[in-house]
Image (cartoon, rainbow, N blue to C red):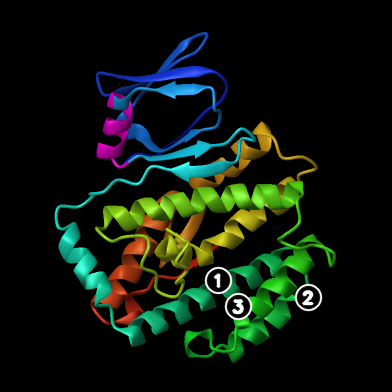
Amino acid sequence: MGWRTVVVSGRAKLDLKMNHLVVRKDSIVKIHIKEIYILIIESTTVSMTMALLSELSREKVKVIFCDEKHNPFGEITSYYNKHNTSLMVKNQIAWKPNFKVGAWTEIVRNKIENQAMLLEKNGFEESLMLRGYLEELKQGDSTNREGHAAKVYFNALFGMDFSRGMENSVNAALNFGYSVILSAFNREVCCNGYITQLGIFHDNQFNQYNLSSDLMEPFRPFVDEKVVELGPIEFGKEEKLAILELMEEQIVVGDRLCSLQNAIEIYSRSIFDAIEEENLSLIKRVCYEL
């Protein structure tokens, strides 16, 4: 599996040569395909060959395309990433509702835990309210503790006037980071033979990535922490590169310290195993430190 996050900005031509991505600009850069985890095409002035796109897809490299404002708007998702995809999709359709509900409960619990930890790290007393919401969490989050926690959490981090619907540099940074995390989860869902449309909790007919939207929830606070550190007055190339570095930062999954990129793989597999084997104790917790 690759480990590099590659960003191509400005006018460039991309092609394939001897299993290498070749980036042709004023100078030529070559990167072996197997080293690449995510490829982000940040400019609409980039051209690519079909031979390259085919090889990237074959090697399960997630390719993300950005629009004229340099914001992610789409990605390549391969049809087949595992030899028994048809079987895995049948299993996915047959996942038992009670184990899906149980898995979602643990996902929400882990998300609120990480939000509370981030508030504690930054000295916000509102972390105590989130700890209280954890005590009140019911099966399937039937009382929407996640929503209540989110309001308290974002207001503490970014101010009482902050709203996720506002157009500003903070939300631009958050959206960019979430898009990258979502794409990484899309890759893992497909690599494990499942389809992204069928979620555990998310069930929006207009969302192609319902399952990935479920899985990524406990990882959102890692993006939030990076945005807090950056405190972006504007959101440009330097800020985007700083957020992309998040994929290589160390976090804990289960009892193991690893890069966030590897944690996404391990965590995804733990959720799938827990539902398939009907054993919720298999779900691995993700957090900041041991």
Tell me the CA gap for discs 2 and 3: 18 Å
Q: In the image, is 254 to the left or to the right of 178?
A: left
- What residue type is disc 1 on? Lys
- Residue corresponding to mark 1: 111
Q: How many marks?
A: 3
Mark 3 lies on a secondary structure that is helix
Point out residue 102 in the picture as x, y percentages from the top left corner.
40, 84
Task: Give the mark nearer the N terminus: 3 vs 1.
Answer: 1
Mark 1 lies on a secondary structure that is helix
Specify whether residue 123 is in view.
no
Name the residue: 66% across, 56% down: 225
The chief SS type of the magenta part is helix
Crowding at label 1, few (<14), some or many (≥20) Cα neighbours within 10 Å? many
Q: Are marks 3 and 1 in contact (CB under 8 Å)?
A: yes
Point out residue 276 in the picture as x, y percentages from the top left corner.
25, 75
10 versus 65 height, above or below: above
- What residue type is disc 3 on? Glu
Q: Which residues are magenta?
A: 51-60
Quarter of the picture containing the N terminus is top left
Of circles 2 and 3, the one toward us is: 3
Quadrant hosting residue 137: bottom right
57 versus 137 height, above or below: above
Quadrant hosting residue 125: bottom right
In the rendered image, residue 55 lying in the magenta stretch gets the answer yes
Name the residue: 40% across, 74% down: 200
Tell me the CA gap for discs 2 and 1: 18 Å
- Residue corresponding to mark 3: 146
